[in-house]
Image: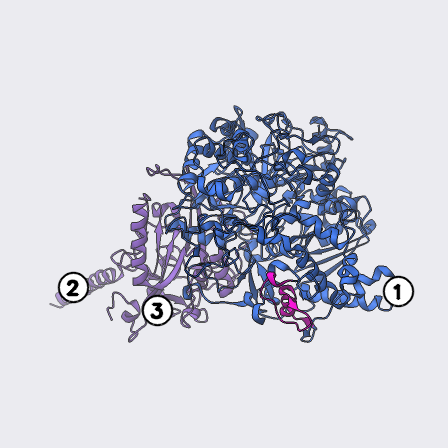
Amino acid sequence: MDNAASPAAASGYADPPRRMGFFTDTSVCIGCKACEVACKEWNGVPDDGFNLLGMSYDNTGGLSANSWRAVAFIEQPAPPKAPDGGAGDLRWLMMSNVCKHCTHAACLDVCPTGALFRTEFSTVVVQEDICNGCGYCIPACPYGVIDQREGDGRAWKCTMCYDRIGDGLTPACAKACPTQSIQYGPLDELRGRAEQRQAKLHEAGETSARLYGNDPGDGVGGDGAFFLLLDEPEVYGLPPDPVVTTRDLPKMWRTAGLAALTMAAAVVAAFVGRSR
Amino acid sequence: MIQGSNMAEAHPVGFQWVVDAKQRGAKVIHVDPRFTRTSALADRYVPIRAGSDIAFLGGIVNHILSRGLDFREYVLAYTNAATIITKDFRDTEDLDGLFSGWDPVAGVYDPASWQYEGHQEDSPSVAEVAAHKEVAGGLRHESHGAPVGRHTQRDETLQDPRCVYQILKRHYSRYTPEMVQEVCGVPPDVFAEVCRAWTENSGRERTTCLVYSVGWTQHSVGVQYIRTGAIIQLLLGNMGRPGGGILALRGHASIQGSTDIPTLFNLLPGYLPMPHHAQHPTLDKWVEGTIHQAQKGFWGSARAYCVSLLKAYWGEKATPDNDFCFGYLPRLTGDHGTYQQTLDMIDGKICGYFLLGQNPAVGSAHGRAQRLGMANLDWLVVRDLYEIESATFWKNGPEIETGEIVTEECRTEVFLLPAAAHVEKEGSFTQTQRMLQWREKALDPPGDCRSELWFFYHLGRLIRQKLAGSTQQRDRPILDLAWEYPTHGPHDEPSAEAVLMEINGYTLPDRQPLSGFSELKDDGSTVCGCWIYSGVFKDGVNQAARRKPGTDQDWVASEWAWAWPMNRRILYNRASADPDGKPWSERKKYVWWDPERNEWTGFDVPDFEKTKPPSYRPPDGATGPAALAGDDPFVMQGDGKGWLYVPSGLIDGPLPTHYEPVESPIRNPLYKQQFNPTRRYYDRPDNPLNPVGSTVFPYVFTTSRLTEHHTAGGMSRTLAYLSELQPAMFIEVSPELAALRGLRPLDWAHVVTTRAVVEARVLVTDRLRPLRVENHAVHQVWLPYHWGYAGLVTGDAANDLLGIALDPNVLIQESKVGTCDVQPGRRPTGRALLAYLADYRRRAGLSEGNQRG
């Protein structure tokens, strides 16, 4: 199996199953938040407090240790209408955000205990009984997804329902989504479907439709959970050009190593010189 | 076309099919006072002033008729467009907002002049109409039209000034785009786009579906809102055809089921009317009262439905000699609707009350009246999943703070009984599409929680035990009931399937299951608990439990569960073929006549006698089904036609007419008559209304639901995962109103009507916008009605703001529009709250004995 297409294979799984992923099509999201509730029900995630945030209908406030799916609501003036008319002068964007399950996952790279691991489905999962709460993974995530739970200290995030997909079940959020805004399946199939959907939207005059996280050539090697957006990623609170934060580590280590070697050589040279 | 419905938020699961249709190219239009999550998914959103929908839809009717855009072949053959009306009929255009026959003393119309020509003698008297209004008699027409005779005079050229087509054309001629703008605040170009989309997507090749929900129903002219939608769908030929129709989205779980097998005071199962003490002294009179002797159609067999129901109730005791125990049925003596009952409780006329799956302290209009009523009972039984507000008003309701209810003095004894949730019991749900879907029990209910079926079966059993041996005549109806159901398990749970079998019906004495209502007999040889559900246990198989996936069958998926009647998925589907029985188009073929096999066939169960050819013409004197011609698709109507014009059965007129809501910021721009003249209003000091055009109450408010919460909150504010998603009562206001009243995001504001003050956090949003109506800005605000004083997240109840004014046909409250004031900051508390309200009433010109300004 091609290692680039299968991070699981790259991680040493012999003959792993196909890489599984999420395609979240925001153009059909109705903002019902069933994904948030289903996720919490299945995974036993605690509630996140009863706080009215005033951010349109988003009272979750983004992904956190206690919210592994979070629907963003953006009220904005509508872009110029397509020739056959539009919804009016207003647009209400909704997007169910989730862990991206990166091809190159920095959280996993920096985890010192091995609590974070790559599954056979190429997803990234934290093992709650191994995590020691060091928190290194938190600044490592380029998306700000993984988070420490208050009063618990450990890191928590979406597991793509590892305990369901192994049994051939659909993750809870995708299962609960009434409009198939959240689709689960083999990643390559999802990518093909997403391209078709994007083309169809462009055809219909929805030229702002774009895919996010689908490109294996991007800074994280492509996401296992990618999106169809209707505006710039920043509008949804997503980084426009995410880069695996450990990308430069080898180079940095090489540079540091070289510097150390040079220094050592200089020291040696100095002593050698003195003894002369 | 979605109007009067926030489908994406209140019916998210059903909305998946709208999303599906949209992806396949359907254009979705949403008309609503507020930009909602439904608008977000629509191709076009049209803001409208709350309470002005008839003007908007009437404008579309005018657009169709003035341009001749109706589907003429369909209209001529299948509707009553050609039918001639009496020469005495006068329209609201002639009488400035009233139809002919208005009786100001009785508060109802004499409908004689509305009748089909030659049918005047069939018209009910004013006294009968008044009695009909008292008991919301119109509700029974949910399954069949009002009784009319089959013989009508017609003008097939549609030119006679007295034919329905011409009357309709004149009636809506003033509903111009300019008038629509003036009344609704919808600009002409946007209105034209809607007209174009609707008409261009209707006809032989295309159909348009209309969706509404309680945003239409809950008005003092609610029935006529829906009628206007029906007129458009009939004119454009969208009824009885695939992709067409009118989808009345029904509420949670089994609201459709609870009208089919009703929890209503005025109906018996299958829309049989509850007998009236004066009008229905005998079985014969009861049956006669529901049908017209010379009518066409299947309603003509009503006697068999009635007798089979009585056999289900009283079994062997029901015999031809005793009118099948007809005398045992309760009798209506007047208005026993839920709001009349509430007021009767306040007045001490009602002693006890059962509340099941209902939380009127939060969920019903005029919450204060609801709570004061419940605080004046001897006993109250609340069966619910949680300790809801209606079980705790005596200790923590808002009236405790104002001193209007004193815990120590409250006389009501409350029995809170824990109920089983839907996954903890078996049974059927009937959804929007009239489809019964069987649910198995997933787990046992915890502790003492029990199903409703268990509760009523054992309540009945125990009452019968207590009455055993009684010689009192009044106890016979209970003692003679056929109350035998098999039970199982440690708690003697009755078998829900045995109940479904009884609903389906069976023969006597061999108890063979019936396969449909056409097998019902009026001689006592069949039992049937609900005639329209007959067939759900066909062949002794629970048809509602069928689970064949849609992917394993054709697109109609007839083998998934079971829809009434007779597993038909689209009603009146004979109309999907032309008068000769051929599909209107290949693209829209659904049910058609097969001349080789001499029968109706198609994708669905034909809603027609299977072997009656399109060419069939009834002989003189025929009645019932035999009187239906081969091209009469509306088989439950007395004349076999779809009714553009309703000659009989409606209290407020044969044609929908724009009236302002009972509380409105403006005078009616169309007529001198401001309101629905026949609206039901309880004129008493505790039910005041805001005066029309009051500067004290200058804004329009409307209330509805959020996806995150369930109605009065009993099933959502009690759960952390739902409470956190919408944790606080809030109000949505436009930036313009926020600036006008000094309202800041997340700060508090309070809303005032003559009945109540409620406070809420402020959400300023462009999704609400002022509309230009009659050349001034009308500001609209929106409130969710989910909050109350119990649960994990609490807040003021929006329904407290409402008064009690009802639609005259069905007694639904006008809860989707009212007027109010909005002020920044929190509301006063305690006694100061009452003084604050009294001051508002004084400023609005209301005083004791002058509730309406």
Residue type, label 3: Phe
* Element marked by disc 1: loop
Tell me the residue that label 1 is attached to: B471
Residue A87 image-quadrant placement: top left
Q: CA distance from mark 1 to mark 3?
A: 76 Å
Chain letter for the residue marked with disc 3 in the picture:
A
Q: Which chain is purple?
A: A
Query: Circle 3 — which element?
Result: loop
Crowd around label 2: few <14 · some 14–19 · many ≥20 (10 Å): few
- Rendered position, B387 above or below A2: above
Q: Write down the colour of chain B.
A: blue
Give me the C-alpha separation between circle 3 and circle 2: 54 Å
2 and 1 marks on the same chain: no
Dot 1 and dot 3 within a common chain: no
The question of residue B496 being in magenta is answered with yes
> What amino acid is labelled 1 in the image?
Thr
Q: Which residue is mark 2?
A: A270
| Disc ID at residue B334 | none
The one of B244 and A10 positioned closer to us in this rendering:
B244
Q: Position of residue B826 (x, y in %)?
A: 63, 38
Q: Is residue A32 visible?
A: no
Chain ID at mark 2: A
Q: Relative to B419, say whether B265 is above or below.
A: above
Q: Which residue is mark 3?
A: A121
B774 sits left or right of A255 in the view? right
What segment is highlighted magenta in the picture? B493-520
* C-beta proximity under 8 Å, tags 1 and 3: no
Looking at marks 3 and 2 on the same chain, the residue that comes earlier in the sequence is marked by: 3
Q: Is residue A149 above or below residue B790?
A: below
**Nearest to viewer (mark 2 / mark 1):** 1
